[in-house]
Image: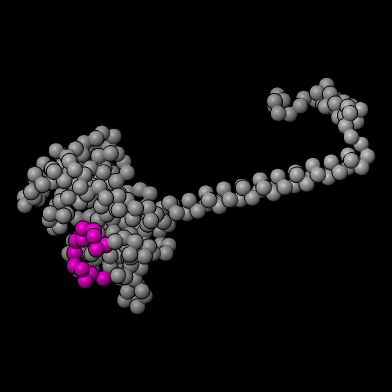
Amino acid sequence: MTSKSTPPPGADRSRHRGAAAATPSSGRRSGPSARLASREAEARRRRLRWLTLGTAAVVVLAVALAVAATRQPEPGEGAVPADVFQLERQPMLGSPDAPVTVVEFADFKCPYCRDFTLHEFPRFKAAYVDTGKVRFYFINYPFIGPDSDTAAEALEAVYAQDPEGAWAFIERVMQRQGPEDQQWATPEFLVELAREAVPSIDAERLAADLRARRYRDEVEADRAIARQAGVQGTPAIFVDGRFVDDWSFEGLQAAVEEALARRQGGAAPGDAE
């Protein structure tokens, strides 16, 4: 079957040729003035081609830069600088003198984050955090739904009241995580979870903080950190600033052992503060 954009064989092609052959008798200019007009038309066509090519090049460059700025880092590639993570304002577990730094970006509605928190992290904590080898940080990256932000703001509010209690709150929210496609992380539910996990919490203050969205800016700042680090999904875990694709215990174990070996060998850590 012949395409609409391609003239069929036979009559249509002959008509095209016929129309072209009739052109000289249609009143167009001839001689020097026609040649001048032809040169001017060709010059306009060249300018238009260069303008089109230049515009296309700018668009391609802009797209490439946007992709590079937002893509997930590749495992093992260059480390994200330490100051990007703003670790001084993030919940931290372990010894501040631990040689290796691990950072997790998470969304409380992410089922994979739940799996990591409840099934992989306890082994990792026992092997590396409790033994003084790793200091572990948690950074919000809410993106799944509106209540992802609510849960992230609740963590910031709990952390402001009781930094140590933040970790019990993280675990409790992950334990009670609802379906990803439902808005279950309501202020009332999160306040109740905080009461259960952190007995010292001022529940009325927490509820007021959530109503006023007092920690919205802190959550937005975390989201900006995630974008700058190239995070596109959760959990996203960095060991000494290097993205680790395999967040299982074994995957993190390999990454941490490699980081420890680099330090023992005198290599500069990827996220030294």
What's the residue at 35%, 68% (across, down)? 270
Q: Residue 230, percent across and down?
A: 39, 54
* Residue span colored magenta: 87-99
Q: Residue 103, percent across and down?
A: 28, 59
As drawn, the residue found furthest toward the bottom would be 266
Q: Residue 97, percent across and down?
A: 21, 71
| Residue 97 shown in magenta | yes
Nearer to the camera, 250 or 87: 87
What's the residue at 52%, 49% (across, down)? 63
- Looking at the figure, which quarter contains the C terminus? bottom left
Q: Residue 169, percent across and down?
A: 15, 49
Q: Main secondary structure of the magenta part?
A: loop
Q: How is the image coloured?
A: one colour
What's the residue at 33%, 65% (across, down)? 82
| Residue 46 shown in magenta | no
Q: Is residue 147 visible?
A: yes
